[in-house]
Each structure stands twice: as structure tokens, then as C-alpha cells.
Image (cartoon, rainbow, N blue to C red):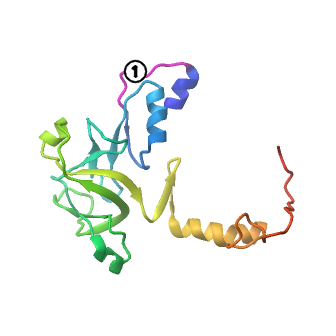
């Protein structure tokens, strides 16, 4: 939406879109702001919508407040390695009957930095005092609205593409070291 507005010369000043579904990075924030809009990210998943809402006085692009009235959030810490989880993995337990699923320390494949210091925004005054930053998946890749399981990406990179185009999973550039680049595809410069 913001890229289309920029192309059309439309100023989105005063717009406050909410974004969800992909990691909210400084690059994504820059595109939205360049169109004149201010964005409020939202953190959620299909299994548990509304895990967090963007801080209204953020220290970073994805600075969010955890919705304490909906979810208990824990992290495995160093013990996570025993369960094949990173120390910063987000584990969620549902607090309300109305949630889509009843969860007890369930992982949705994400990790985050959990902070507990004041920001002074209205969401903190509502009681949402835990903040989440650097929200990223440790098991899936999401880009352009599409989510790919890490196992599928690894299979494509290490098996499917080398089988189709040659090379092996250990080649730095898809060809054995020292051999000239030969391709059935035309080189475009």
C-alpha cells in the first residue's frame, strides 16, 4: 500500500496502519514512514492472535507490549537446548476460554527479547508492562506474505536446486571450486 502511494505521489500523513504476519524490520518501517504513515505492529499467530500490540513510544520497530490478559509468556532459557528450543523461544499458555486453542507452554516457532522496563505509553498504563523486541522465527522464513517452514527451505537449497541445476549443497556458489561457470541460462549484464 505504501509503495503504491509513493509511486502515485499520494501522501499518507495521518495514516496509522497495523501490520502483522512478518517480522517488522527497520527496512519495512522506513518504507511505511517514507509514505508519511506511522505504523503500529501487532504480534500474533494463527494459533494465538493478539499476543502483543506495538508500543506507542517504541524504542525499535517491533517494540510490542504483551497482552497479559490473554497469554502467559515464558521462555525456556538455557534449558531450552534440552528441548531443541533457543533460550529466547516464546512459549505461550492461554488464559481465556475464548481463545482459538487451549495452549500450555506451546511454541509457535518464535523467539524474542523480553523486557520489563517502563516506556510510559498508554498500553503500559493498561497493565501490559512486558515488552517484546526482536521478534523472529527460529523455524520458518516469512517474506512477502508467504511463510516457509525451515525444513522446506533447506530441502530446496540443499537437494532440489542442486539436483535440478547442478552442484551440491556444499558448493559456495553452486559449482565445485576451481571450475569455470557454465550455464544453460544466458548471462545478462
* Residue visible at 35% across and 42% down in the picture: 60
Q: Nearer the viewer, residue 95 or 29?
A: 29
Residue 48 x/y as whole percent? 29, 57
Residue 117 x/y as whole percent? 18, 48
Q: Give above or below for 110 relative to 35.
A: below
Q: Give above or below for 79 relative to 113.
A: below
Left or right, 95 with reference to 147: left
* Residue visible at 27% across and 71% down in the picture: 76
Left or right, 23 with reference to 93: right
Q: How many marks?
A: 1
- Local crowd size for mark 1, using a 10 Å CA cut-off: few (<14), some (14–19), many (≥20): few
Q: Give above or below for 18 relative to 182.
A: above
Residue 73 x/y as whole percent? 22, 61
Secondary structure at badge 1 equals loop
Residue that lies at the very extreme toward the bottom in this rendered image:
82
Q: Give above or below for 63 relative to 91.
A: above
Q: Which residues are magenta?
A: 9-16
Q: Nearer the viewer, residue 70 or 136?
A: 136
Q: Is residue 12 magenta?
A: yes
Left or right, 118 with reference to 163: left
In the picture, which quadrant includes the C terminus? top right
Q: Which residue is mark 1?
A: 13
Q: Is residue 176 magenta?
A: no
* Residue visible at 21% across and 50% down in the picture: 67
Amino acid at each position: 500500500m505504501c509503495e503504491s502511494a509513493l509511486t502515485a505521489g499520494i501522501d499518507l500523513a495521518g495514516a496509522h496502519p497495523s501490520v502483522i504476519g512478518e517480522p517488522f524490520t527497520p527496512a519495512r518501517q522506513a518504507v511505511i514512514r517514507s509514505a508519511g504513515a506511522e505504523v503500529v505492529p501487532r504480534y500474533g499467530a494463527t494459533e494465538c492472535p493478539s499476543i502483543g500490540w506495538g508500543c506507542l513510544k517504541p524504542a525499535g520497530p517491533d517494540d510490542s507490549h504483551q497482552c497479559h490478559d490473554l497469554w502467559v509468556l515464558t521462555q525456556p532459557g538455557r534449558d531450552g537446548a534440552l528441548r531443541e528450543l533457543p533460550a529466547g523461544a516464546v512459549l505461550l499458555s492461554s488464559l481465556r476460554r475464548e481463545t482459538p486453542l487451549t495452549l500450555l507452554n506451546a511454541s509457535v516457532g518464535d523467539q524474542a527479547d523480553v523486557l520489563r522496563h517502563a516506556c510510559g505509553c498508554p498500553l503500559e498504563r493498561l497493565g501490559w508492562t512486558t515488552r517484546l523486541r526482536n521478534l523472529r522465527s527460529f523455524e520458518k522464513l516469512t517474506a512477502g506474505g508467504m511463510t516457509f517452514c525451515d525444513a522446506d527451505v533447506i530441502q530446496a537449497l540443499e537437494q532440489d536446486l542442486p539436483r535440478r541445476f547442478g552442484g551440491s549443497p556444499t558448493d559456495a556458489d553452486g559449482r565445485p571450486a576451481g571450475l569455470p561457470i557454465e550455464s544453460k541460462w544466458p548471462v545478462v549484464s
